[in-house]
Amino acid sequence: MANLRTCLAFLFLCCSLCDAVYEDQVGKFDWRQQYVGKVLFAHFESHSQASKKLILATDKNIVASLNPRTGDLFWRQVDKAGPEGHIDTLLFHGQDAVVVTGNGRLLRSWESSVGALNWEMLLDPGSFLAAVLVGTQDSVKFVAVLKKATVSLHYLSNGHQKWTETLPDSDTVHYQAVYSSGGSQLFVLGVVPHSHLSIITFNIEDGEITSQRSVDAPWLSSIQARCTVVGQGVLICADASTLSLYMLPLSSEEPVGLQQVPLQSLDLDLALGFQPVLLTTQPNPARPPLAQFFLQLGPDHHVLLQLSDGHLSPLRDFQPAFLVSFATTGEKTVAAVLSPKNETVSSKEGWLVFDHVCNEQACSVSLYSADSGRRLLDTTVTIHLDPNGGKPEKLYVHAFLKKDDSVGYRVLVQTEDHTITFLQQPGRIVWTREEALADVVTMEMVDLPLTGTQAELEGEFGKKAAGLAGYGLAAMVLKRLSSQLILLQAWIAHLWKLFYDARKPRSQVKNEVTIETLARDEFNLQKMMVMVTASGKLFGIDSKSGMVLWKHYLRNVQPNAVFKLMVQRTTAHFPHPPQCTLLIKDKETGLAALHVFNPIFGKKSHVTPPTLSRPVLQSLLLPLMDQDYSKVLLLIDDEYKVTAFPSTKNVLQQLQEMASAIYFFLVDASQGKLSGFRLRKDLSTELIWEVVIPPEVQKIVAVKGKRANEHVHSQGRVMGDRSVLYKYLNPNLLAVVTESVDTHQERSFVGVFLIDGVTGRIIHEAVQRKARGPIHLVHSENWVVYEYWNAKSRRNEFSVLELFEGTELYNSTVFSSLDRPHLPQVLQQSYIFPSSISTMEATLTEKGITSRHLLVGLPSGAILSLPKMFLDPRRPEMATEQSREENLIPYAPEMPIRTEWFINYNQSVTRVRGIYTAPSGLESTCLVVAYGLDIFQTRVYPSKQFDVLKDDYDYVLISSVLFGLFFATMISKRLAQVKLLNRAWR
Amino acid sequence: MASPGGHGGGAVSTRGGGGTRRMKWALELSLGNTRQFPVPSCRSRGDRQSSQGDTLYPIGYSDKPVPDTSVQEADRNLVEKRCWDVALGPLKQIPMNLFIMYMSGNTISIFPIMMVCMMAWRPIQALMSLSATFKLLESSSQQWLQGIVYLIGNLLGSALAIYKCQSMGLLPTHSSDWLAFIEPPQRMEIMGGGMVL
């Protein structure tokens, strides 16, 4: 028997060693979506008529080019994550996208058509402040980069530095802006806050300072936000305290002061407490900016002003208008204004309705001539904003001249939920990109609901059956017959559809997935992916196609909020809708809120979550259920009191009964304290244990328990002599990883503690000397795998800990942490891994029979499916008869990376941050979602598909052989009969 | 069952039942059988027959001599010997089985499995038809001894088969064989928590 099993295991082993995707399977059950992140800068490439592109730079340190027709990526250049690769600015001219990255560290130029790097220059050290394109004699030749103490000029063609000059008095003057208008001068503007403005003029040719002057401006604190240059080199500043605009001609020789223009003299009024914002445009860097500019006076109030002959005059007042933007095509410059569609209503109610106005009704964008402020006819684009989305935040307008010389345009709207929508006249959405998905924080996979017929059948055994039982057998039989009939009907309909579709060409048959047609498939392979993003937007994505089926933007979510997603009720309890709960905790105030929703439709649930007045420390989902089959969620506040949700009488009663068996632990990394609590009957708690890991020596970096939905089929391991080594399967075991505070190569270490979460007993303690993080950890079944950096040997290493109870089970029926006199045997082994890793997760299957694989996300974007068999501390140094019997691979210090183990073949997942695994209805199959900058979904078969026929199973051959044999039997039987008869006659 | 044994058994029973039935059958078949003893005359008649044609002789007449069964009738020792053959048959197969066992090895593949199945099935079949075999041995004087020897032989054969199964690892005799049936232990405590959010 054991031999048979080992034989099978060996078969699996052989199979799993050739676990790659065939060429024709590509894209069959996997998909990848690529994102770029929140758009910071966007430019339309409009110079060449043939290839229109949209060039973006995002907060994820990406320069990308999109196809404006489809929204697909043309190319994407991913820089280092973090501040080192941060994109400071994006300037665009002709075919070149010039980017300053890493706070002025690098100046790069990208070729916009293919995304190739034109050139790259390392800039002098110093924090970056501003960069501008500089043109002379109608052609743009240079890039000027302003840093804290220097200004430098680079050639646009090759990046070489033309000159660099140090700025005078850079320790007192804050230089903030650089400006050129096509002449031979370059202006650098600096400010001494609340004192004066400093203007330095450089000669573009040789970098010589031609003039230097300072102007008193005691009200000015910053140039970047408040000042801009308009027209023929006139600096305009807005000041909220004096309610005035100030003008100063930059190039005038005589020492004139700032000319004050009170807003009242222009019949304008500033909204209370609002800082005015100026918006100007310089269509061509080789020419001065336009004389027209926008002044924002309130959240929904913009004014188009014109500067002519040194006088300001308002051209047009836009109220309500949320966003304004300039766009230039040829010689024409237009202003696009976003305002609510229903102007009369909103103007009556004033700007109080602002918060809702663009969310609940449509907005419209209209074009106005920038010269005159006149409205251009037939230029309105209506934007129907998603009620579950955010407010528009930015407007990028791509204007073009039509054949009849009128101005047409398309508009890119960025909303605060990081969605970008591209619209064209008269309001058709060309495409939408959900860039919030570039930053997925956490996710869950939820089973899809049953179809009506399946539910009917289920109902027979469910609640309805209980009612029917009273009517006796006849009713039950009738019920069964009717449900079978319905099933038959559905089956025939399905067959008919198959037949009907088969006649159509392949390309026309599209299985449109809509939220109404969602139903669980035969093997539960299609699920709903509920994704929570850092921006506070929730998504429901169909795991089969990757289509976003619902989205919901949570307003008022702080940027650094912590999320925890829990599935309270699955789809298994039919009349009750499934229910997910998202715990959102604001890091600053510590206060938490619960968002309860239906994971299939994304709708907010009618259930009112409890109001949490105190900061929440942790939450705990109990396996207890209330009468509506929703699991009980316990929330622990900072006074260690517990709030239950739902908190019906039934639940409270159950909690009272169970209280003595409910434990929880809290880990305070800052104090290095682990503490365990027990629930009392009155929902208060008592501290029962505490472990302190001194934070001066080492800090806790990760704590991992086991997954609640994990099943372990085999309680032990079969040895070569056919005895059993029983696994130590403690469901309360925690793996705590610490890193030393001292990061010196010789003294740094990594500690791993295995602690029982109920009793606080330290089961095992291991210290890895001369090792450093970042540490990636997987804790499952009876093993812990972690990866660290070996500082001494300068390599990445995997280490595996496995716990065994021994050859005898202490108690085979119940597991209680309180009654465990013997410590488990702990085995450990380490391996060299040839690459660093980004994240790690273990596969998960329904019953836990299938062998386990580790899914390792590599920085290269590959996802490696590493058989757990290779990470086995029982691997012997010398292969013996017994170890061979056990299928143990002899120990080899080096762990291989085989390219056929990459489950995502060439579909790299950039900056993979997390891998989520979920079991499917098939024991062999595990669903995998890798998320990071991209999202990749696939299925893995750690033991090959042993429970379904293969994709390439030859149905035709098998059935033809069967039919052939059948007919051959029939014919030969007939022949034999004839022959017998003939012989009898003879 | 081997065919010579069956024939021998038939002969034994005929002899035990008495001469009448045999004589009756012999009478129906031919004339020659009644005159077994005057062999020379028969031969002379046969010679004449062949020279004169078929018409003179009755249907069923054979000019070949019919084998003489009465020779064995007298030889009781031969009966005993045949019975011992039957009884010792299973025992005699054991060395052969041992050889096959040795040759087939302990690996699990289709051929050794077939061998083991055959080795196990034959004694079981023999044990099931034990009463029929006992009937065969009825005529022997050492019937009981022979029966016991036959039984022991078959039991030994099946023991050998079981041993073979054991050495091939097909018997659930180890704790590992029952591992799959161990239920996961029930969890007594509910625990959760984590890093302070």
Image: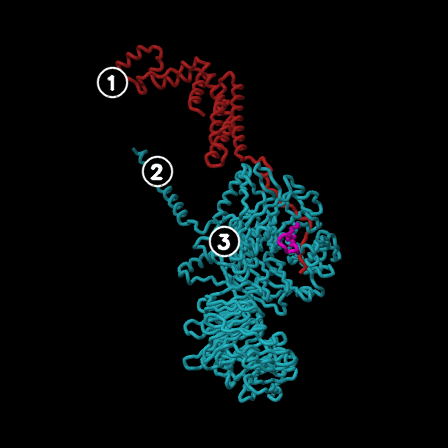
Mark 2, residue position: A976
Tell me how far mark 1 sits from mark 2, CA to CA: 42 Å
Where's residue A969, x and y in %?
A: 38, 41
The front one of A403 and A890 is A890
Residue A935: x %, y % from top left: 53, 61
Tell me which chain the residue with mark 2 is part of. A
Mark 1: secondary structure: loop
The residue shown at (39%, 45%) is A961
Numbered circle sitting on residue A902 = 3
Colour of chain B in the rendered structure image: red
Classify mark 2: helix, strand or loop. helix
In the image, residue A141 lies at what x, y percent? 47, 75
For residue A747: magenta? yes
Given the image, what chain letter belongs to the residue carrying mark 1? B
**Chain part drawn in magenta:** A736-753
The image shows residue A287, relative to residue A723, as above or below, that is: below
Residue tagged 1 = B53
Using a 10 Å C-alpha cutoff, classify the residue at mark 2 as few (fewer than 14 neighbours), some (14 to 19) or many (20 or more).
Answer: few
Taking depth in this image into account, of A289 and A652 the one nearest to the observer is A289
Of residues A63 and A494, the one nearer the viewer is A63
Q: Nearer the viewer, residue A413 or A633?
A: A413
Specify whether disc 1 shares its chain with disc 2.
Answer: no
Name the residue at 63% across, 50% down.
A769
> Can residue A74 be seen at all in this image of the molecule?
no
